Image: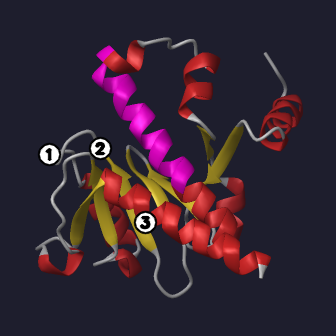
């Protein structure tokens, strides 16, 4: 029952308190990005569980666990984007989506997070079809994925284990933060 301006004001308070952040929808055109839907993420998974009153549900419910993995991955990419100044998006077109797009000007990367290596790549394939710059620059990230380079797969989508991505994000964010201090 909140008006849009009231909701936006309340959301801005949560963003300013470093509890949540939003990702705009990637379109390839700046005007479209500002008009289309945002996706909300929590800075920390524990805050997510408390705010949504999930308790221990992520330990037993595969859907909850998947959402927590997505939030963990995107919040790590968000930290990286803050330190590097590279914009971060999500992408949705109808019923297909990609969880994160790290929109580096010369090396953009699309990332879909899943619970298993059998997770659908439909969103990544649709993104590549609409935005060819992501061909050979798209990855499925899951806890137990093998490392597969996108250029060695038939569909241009690679895979990487979640822990490897998180370590890389942390290292790159730390390097960028130290460079800002110098």
Residues at circles 2 and 1 in contact by the CB criterion of under 8 Å: yes
For image coordinates 55% across by 21% down, the residue present is 49
Q: Secondary structure at mark 2?
A: loop
Position in image of residue 64 (x %, y %): 39, 24
Give the residue drawn at x 19%, y 53%.
145
Foreground tag (3 vs 1) = 3
- Distance from label 2 to label 1 (Cα)? 8 Å
Q: Is residue 40 above or below residue 176?
A: above
Q: Which residue is mark 3?
A: 168
Q: Position of residue 118 (x, y in %)?
A: 14, 45
Residue with the mark numbered 2: 114
- For marks 3 and 1, the one nearer the N-term is 1
Q: Is residue 48 above or below residue 8?
A: above
Residue 118 image label: 1
Q: What secondary structure do most residues of the magenta stretch adopt?
A: helix
Near mark 3 (Cα within 10 A), the count class, few <14, some 14-19 or many ≥20, is: some
Mark 3–mark 1 distance (CA, rounded to whole Å): 23 Å
Please give the range of residues in magenta. Answer: 60-76
Local secondary structure at mark 1: loop
């Amino acid at each position: 029952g909140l008006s849009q301006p009231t909701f936006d004001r309340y959301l801005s308070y949560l963003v300013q308190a470093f509890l949540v952040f939003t990702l705009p929808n990637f379109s390839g055109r700046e005007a479209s990005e500002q008009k289309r839907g945002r996706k909300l993420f929590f800075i920390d998974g524990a805050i997510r569980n408390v705010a949504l009153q999930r308790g221990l549900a992520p330990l037993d419910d595969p859907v909850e666990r998947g959402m927590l993995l997505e939030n963990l991955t995107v919040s790590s990419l968000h930290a990286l984007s803050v330190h590097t100044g590279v914009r971060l998006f999500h992408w949705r077109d109808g019923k297909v989506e990609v969880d994160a797009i790290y929109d580096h000007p010369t090396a953009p990367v699309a990332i879909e997070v899943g619970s298993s290596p059998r997770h659908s790549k439909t969103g990544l394939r649709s993104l590549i079809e609409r935005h060819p710059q992501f061909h050979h620059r798209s990855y499925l990230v899951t806890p137990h994925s093998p490392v597969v380079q996108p250029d060695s797969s038939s569909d241009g989508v690679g895979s990487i284990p979640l822990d490897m991505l998180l370590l890389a994000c942390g290292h790159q964010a730390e390097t960028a933060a130290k460079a800002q201090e110098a």
